[in-house]
Image: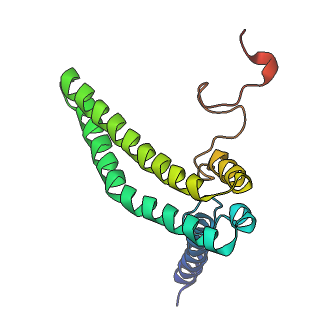
Amino acid sequence: MSKTIKILFLSSLVFNILLIGFIIGNVSHSLFREDSPRIKPRELAVKLPPEKEKFFLDTMEKVHLENRKIRKQLREARERIFSILTAPQFDEASYQSEVEKLHELRGLMMQKLSNATKELAKQFSQEERKALAEHLNRSPRPPRDSRPPDNEGPPLQRKIPPDDRMP
Protein backbone atom coordinates (compact mmCIF):
# COMPACT_ATOMS: atom_id res chain seq x y z
CA MET A 1 0.00 0.00 0.00
CA SER A 2 1.14 3.49 -0.69
CA LYS A 3 1.87 5.99 2.06
CA THR A 4 -1.18 8.13 1.12
CA ILE A 5 -3.58 5.20 1.41
CA LYS A 6 -2.10 4.24 4.79
CA ILE A 7 -2.55 7.78 6.09
CA LEU A 8 -6.15 7.95 4.80
CA PHE A 9 -6.94 4.56 6.31
CA LEU A 10 -5.42 5.48 9.68
CA SER A 11 -7.16 8.88 9.82
CA SER A 12 -10.47 7.24 8.86
CA LEU A 13 -10.01 4.68 11.62
CA VAL A 14 -9.25 7.37 14.22
CA PHE A 15 -12.22 9.46 13.07
CA ASN A 16 -14.60 6.49 13.28
CA ILE A 17 -13.39 5.61 16.78
CA LEU A 18 -13.95 9.20 17.92
CA LEU A 19 -17.40 9.25 16.31
CA ILE A 20 -18.41 6.00 18.00
CA GLY A 21 -17.20 7.35 21.36
CA PHE A 22 -19.18 10.56 20.87
CA ILE A 23 -22.37 8.66 20.01
CA ILE A 24 -22.03 6.26 22.93
CA GLY A 25 -21.36 9.19 25.28
CA ASN A 26 -24.45 11.08 24.19
CA VAL A 27 -26.67 8.00 24.34
CA SER A 28 -25.42 7.10 27.81
CA HIS A 29 -26.01 10.65 29.04
CA SER A 30 -29.58 10.63 27.75
CA LEU A 31 -30.30 7.22 29.28
CA PHE A 32 -28.90 8.00 32.70
CA ARG A 33 -30.17 11.55 33.25
CA GLU A 34 -32.06 12.11 36.50
CA ASP A 35 -35.18 13.25 34.65
CA SER A 36 -35.21 10.23 32.34
CA PRO A 37 -38.47 8.27 32.66
CA ARG A 38 -36.45 5.05 32.44
CA ILE A 39 -34.81 5.65 35.82
CA LYS A 40 -36.48 5.43 39.21
CA PRO A 41 -36.62 8.79 40.96
CA ARG A 42 -34.17 7.78 43.68
CA GLU A 43 -34.84 10.60 46.11
CA LEU A 44 -38.58 9.98 46.13
CA ALA A 45 -38.33 6.19 46.03
CA VAL A 46 -36.14 6.17 49.14
CA LYS A 47 -38.78 8.14 51.04
CA LEU A 48 -41.68 5.84 50.08
CA PRO A 49 -42.62 2.39 51.34
CA PRO A 50 -42.29 -0.30 48.64
CA GLU A 51 -46.02 -0.56 47.85
CA LYS A 52 -46.37 3.21 47.48
CA GLU A 53 -43.18 3.38 45.44
CA LYS A 54 -44.69 0.82 43.05
CA PHE A 55 -47.96 2.78 42.96
CA PHE A 56 -46.04 5.98 42.19
CA LEU A 57 -43.93 4.39 39.44
CA ASP A 58 -46.97 2.67 37.88
CA THR A 59 -48.95 5.91 37.93
CA MET A 60 -46.15 7.92 36.35
CA GLU A 61 -45.60 5.24 33.70
CA LYS A 62 -49.34 5.28 32.94
CA VAL A 63 -49.29 9.07 32.51
CA HIS A 64 -46.19 8.81 30.34
CA LEU A 65 -47.87 6.25 28.09
CA GLU A 66 -51.14 8.23 27.92
CA ASN A 67 -49.23 11.36 26.96
CA ARG A 68 -47.33 9.57 24.18
CA LYS A 69 -50.16 10.17 21.67
CA ILE A 70 -50.43 13.78 22.79
CA ARG A 71 -46.68 14.30 22.36
CA LYS A 72 -46.99 12.95 18.81
CA GLN A 73 -49.84 15.40 18.16
CA LEU A 74 -47.71 18.20 19.65
CA ARG A 75 -44.87 17.39 17.24
CA GLU A 76 -47.30 17.36 14.32
CA ALA A 77 -48.83 20.69 15.40
CA ARG A 78 -45.38 22.24 15.70
CA GLU A 79 -44.50 20.99 12.22
CA ARG A 80 -47.70 22.55 10.84
CA ILE A 81 -46.89 25.82 12.63
CA PHE A 82 -43.40 25.87 11.13
CA SER A 83 -44.76 25.12 7.66
CA ILE A 84 -47.21 28.01 8.03
CA LEU A 85 -44.37 30.29 9.14
CA THR A 86 -42.17 29.31 6.22
CA ALA A 87 -44.91 29.40 3.56
CA PRO A 88 -44.61 32.05 0.83
CA GLN A 89 -47.74 33.77 2.20
CA PHE A 90 -48.31 33.96 5.97
CA ASP A 91 -51.82 32.78 6.90
CA GLU A 92 -52.55 34.41 10.24
CA ALA A 93 -55.81 32.53 10.85
CA SER A 94 -54.20 29.12 10.26
CA TYR A 95 -51.26 30.07 12.43
CA GLN A 96 -53.52 31.18 15.27
CA SER A 97 -55.63 28.03 14.95
CA GLU A 98 -52.58 25.76 15.14
CA VAL A 99 -51.11 27.67 18.08
CA GLU A 100 -54.41 27.29 19.95
CA LYS A 101 -54.33 23.53 19.26
CA LEU A 102 -50.77 23.42 20.55
CA HIS A 103 -51.75 25.18 23.78
CA GLU A 104 -54.76 22.91 24.18
CA LEU A 105 -52.59 19.79 23.82
CA ARG A 106 -50.07 21.09 26.35
CA GLY A 107 -52.92 21.83 28.74
CA LEU A 108 -54.26 18.31 28.25
CA MET A 109 -50.87 16.83 29.12
CA MET A 110 -50.66 18.95 32.26
CA GLN A 111 -54.22 17.98 33.20
CA LYS A 112 -53.32 14.28 32.99
CA LEU A 113 -50.26 14.88 35.18
CA SER A 114 -52.23 16.89 37.73
CA ASN A 115 -54.95 14.20 37.87
CA ALA A 116 -52.31 11.54 38.47
CA THR A 117 -50.71 13.72 41.16
CA LYS A 118 -54.12 14.12 42.81
CA GLU A 119 -54.61 10.33 42.84
CA LEU A 120 -51.15 9.87 44.34
CA ALA A 121 -51.74 12.55 46.96
CA LYS A 122 -54.95 10.87 48.10
CA GLN A 123 -52.96 7.71 48.89
CA PHE A 124 -49.92 9.38 50.48
CA SER A 125 -49.29 10.63 54.00
CA GLN A 126 -48.25 14.24 54.61
CA GLU A 127 -44.53 13.35 54.62
CA GLU A 128 -44.91 11.37 51.41
CA ARG A 129 -46.79 14.28 49.82
CA LYS A 130 -43.94 16.59 50.82
CA ALA A 131 -41.48 14.25 49.10
CA LEU A 132 -43.77 14.12 46.05
CA ALA A 133 -43.97 17.92 45.94
CA GLU A 134 -40.19 18.22 46.15
CA HIS A 135 -39.82 15.68 43.35
CA LEU A 136 -42.33 17.47 41.11
CA ASN A 137 -40.81 20.87 41.88
CA ARG A 138 -37.40 19.87 40.51
CA SER A 139 -37.31 21.20 36.99
CA PRO A 140 -35.75 18.82 34.50
CA ARG A 141 -32.46 20.00 33.07
CA PRO A 142 -32.28 20.49 29.33
CA PRO A 143 -29.88 18.25 27.42
CA ARG A 144 -26.30 19.34 27.98
CA ASP A 145 -25.64 20.42 24.42
CA SER A 146 -28.73 22.65 24.15
CA ARG A 147 -27.82 24.90 27.09
CA PRO A 148 -25.81 28.02 26.29
CA PRO A 149 -22.96 28.72 28.70
CA ASP A 150 -23.62 31.36 31.35
CA ASN A 151 -23.97 34.90 30.00
CA GLU A 152 -23.96 33.75 26.37
CA GLY A 153 -26.72 33.31 23.88
CA PRO A 154 -29.68 35.53 23.14
CA PRO A 155 -30.63 37.94 25.96
CA LEU A 156 -33.84 36.06 26.77
CA GLN A 157 -31.97 32.80 27.32
CA ARG A 158 -28.85 33.91 29.11
CA LYS A 159 -28.58 34.22 32.86
CA ILE A 160 -28.50 37.82 34.00
CA PRO A 161 -26.58 38.58 37.19
CA PRO A 162 -28.73 40.23 39.91
CA ASP A 163 -26.95 43.61 39.62
CA ASP A 164 -27.81 43.85 35.88
CA ARG A 165 -31.56 43.36 36.35
CA MET A 166 -33.87 46.23 35.71
CA PRO A 167 -36.15 47.46 38.55
- Horizontally, residue 19 falls left or right of residue 69, namely right
User: How did the renderer colour the structure?
Assistant: rainbow
- The residue furthest right is 163
- Horizontally, residue 143 falls left or right of residue 105, namely right
> Which residue is located at x 52 percent, y 91 percent?
1
* Residue closest to the eye, 95 or 2: 95
Number of marks in the image?
Answer: 0
Quarter holding residue 10: bottom right
- The residue furthest bottom is 1
x, y (%) of residue 51?
A: 62, 73
Give the answer, above or below, for where 120 lies relative to 157. below
> Which residue is located at x 66 percent, y 53 percent?
132
Quarter holding residue 49: bottom right
Give the answer, above or below, for where 11 lies relative to 104. below
> From the image, which quarter does the C terminus lie in?
top right
> Which residue is located at x 69 percent, y 40 percent?
149
Give the answer, above or below, for where 66 lies relative to 98. below
x, y (%) of residue 163?
A: 81, 17
x, y (%) of residue 54?
A: 58, 72
* Residue closest to the eye, 63 or 146: 63
- The residue furthest top is 167
x, y (%) of residue 86?
A: 26, 33
